[in-house]
Image (spheres, rainbow, N blue to C red):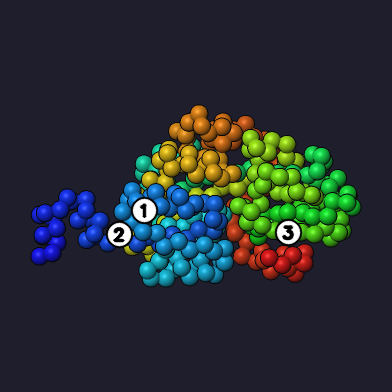
């Protein structure tokens, strides 16, 4: 009776606001930068939903939340994490849909009639190192006055770095440095730190050291767990996240570059667009295909780096 009264005597929008409870959507993110609060609030208002956001980089916790019932509805994470989850049959695969049509071909598997997508790339980033006076990374290691090395706290990338540096015979020089690992949002700074810092290569940092076996190409995006009971709604949310207005807002606040081929707004510098990846020299760049589940243990046991 109460609902009928409100629908009969109040504007429909008001009755919806006060009677219908927003749908809760569970979303898990590995980095704060992937889903800023302002974007969350805008999507909640536009889609009449409520996000329950979990931020974690603990692999066991992620697996538990993907398998649990009810499971997470959307994951925002690195490509190689999603690839590993997919090998465990934990992610939903879908045939081509409007979202895949927006993504530049460079970031999708080869076209085929049976192509299934379990990971929707949204952002990419090429990394390098900022050193004092634009010196080489090896010169930084040899400089006894430069004491601190700031690294992205991605255990897979860290293990690749240290393995390569071991092969180059640099471990004894690294042992003389103070090593700090930081999340992406804390690593980025406009101020030059003493020592060396791993940074995203873009128009704000054009002078990074990006020599072979030192820089990495990282891709972040979204996946929908197989155990989610809101797959259709999850895809609707991802389509909303991939609109030009939402993407431009996020990209201009973060160090990410877009994977969307139609994002050509003059507000977004050419270096931040999907097409810019063709201009980068990726030979020798670190590419990670899957998550190394033993990475934290190997970093601790072999390189004395405790995350």
Label 2 environment density (alpha carbons within 10 Å; few <14, some 14–19, many ≥20): some
Which residue shows up at 49% across the image and 51% down it? 36
N-term-proximal mark, 3 vs 1: 1
Q: Which residue is pictured at 66% across the width and 64% down the height?
A: 295
Q: Compare residues 34 and 253 and report the one nearer the observer.
A: 253
How many numbered markers are drawn? 3
Q: Is residue 166 left or right of residue 56?
A: right
On the question of residue 167 being in view, the answer is no
- The location of residue 203, given as percent across then percent down, is 63, 35
Query: Counting residues from the N terminus, which is met first, the one under dot 2 or under dot 3?
Result: 2
Percent x, y of residue 85: 50, 61
Q: Is residue 179 left or right of residue 126?
A: right
As drawn, the label of residue 180 is 3
Tell me the residue that label 2 is attached to.
Answer: 22
Q: Taking 273 as reference, is 63 above or below it? A: below
Q: Residues within 10 Å of mark 1 (few under 14, many from 20)?
A: some
Residue placed under numbered mark 1 in the picture = 44
Whether residue 84 can be seen here: yes
Foreground label between 3 and 1? 1
Secondary structure at badge 3 equals strand
Is residue 108 or residue 53 the one in the foreground?
53
Q: CA distance from mark 1 to mark 2?
A: 9 Å
Pointers 1 and 2 in contact (C-beta within 8 Å): yes
Q: Are marks 3 and 1 in contact (CB under 8 Å)?
A: no
Element on which disc 2 rests: loop
- Residue 153 % position (x, y): 65, 58
Q: Residue 246 at x, y = what percent?
A: 43, 42
Residue at the image point whose x is 52% and y is 62% from the top: 55
Label 3 environment density (alpha carbons within 10 Å; few <14, some 14–19, many ≥20): some
Residue visible at 51% across and 32% down in the picture: 267
Q: In this view of the protein, which residue sits in the foreground, 106 or 53?
A: 53
């Amino acid at each position: 009776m109460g609902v009928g009264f409100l629908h009969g005597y109040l504007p429909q929008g008001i009755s919806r606001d006060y009677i219908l409870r927003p749908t809760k959507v569970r979303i898990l993110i590995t980095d704060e930068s992937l889903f800023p609060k302002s974007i969350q609030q805008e999507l909640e208002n536009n889609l009449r939903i409520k996000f329950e956001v979990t931020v974690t980089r603990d692999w066991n916790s992620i697996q538990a939340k993907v398998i649990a019932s009810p499971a997470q509805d959307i994951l925002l994470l690195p490509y190689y994490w999603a690839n590993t989850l997919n090998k465990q049959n934990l992610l939903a695969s879908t045939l081509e849909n409007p979202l895949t049509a927006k993504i530049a071909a460079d970031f999708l598997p080869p076209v085929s009639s049976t192509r299934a997508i379990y990971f929707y790339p949204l952002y990419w980033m090429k990394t390098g190192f900022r050193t004092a006076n634009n010196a080489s990374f090896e010169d930084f290691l040899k400089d006894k006055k430069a004491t601190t090395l700031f690294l992205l706290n991605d255990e897979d990338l860290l293990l690749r770095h240290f393995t390569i540096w071991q092969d180059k015979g640099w471990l004894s020089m690294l042992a003389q440095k103070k090593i700090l690992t930081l999340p992406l949002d804390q690593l980025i700074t406009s101020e030059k730190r003493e020592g060396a810092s791993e940074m995203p290569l873009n128009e704000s940092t054009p002078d990074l050291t990006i020599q072979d076996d030192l820089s990495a190409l990282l891709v972040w995006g979204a996946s929908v767990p197989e155990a989610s009971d809101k797959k259709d709604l999850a895809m609707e949310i991802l389509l909303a996240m991939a609109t030009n207005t939402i993407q431009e807002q996020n990209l201009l606040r973060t160090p990410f570059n877009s994977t969307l081929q139609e994002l050509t707004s003059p507000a977004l510098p050419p270096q931040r667009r999907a097409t810019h990846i063709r201009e980068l020299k990726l030979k020798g760049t670190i590419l990670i295909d899957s998550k190394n589940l033993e990475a934290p243990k190997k970093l601790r046991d072999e390189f004395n780096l405790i995350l």
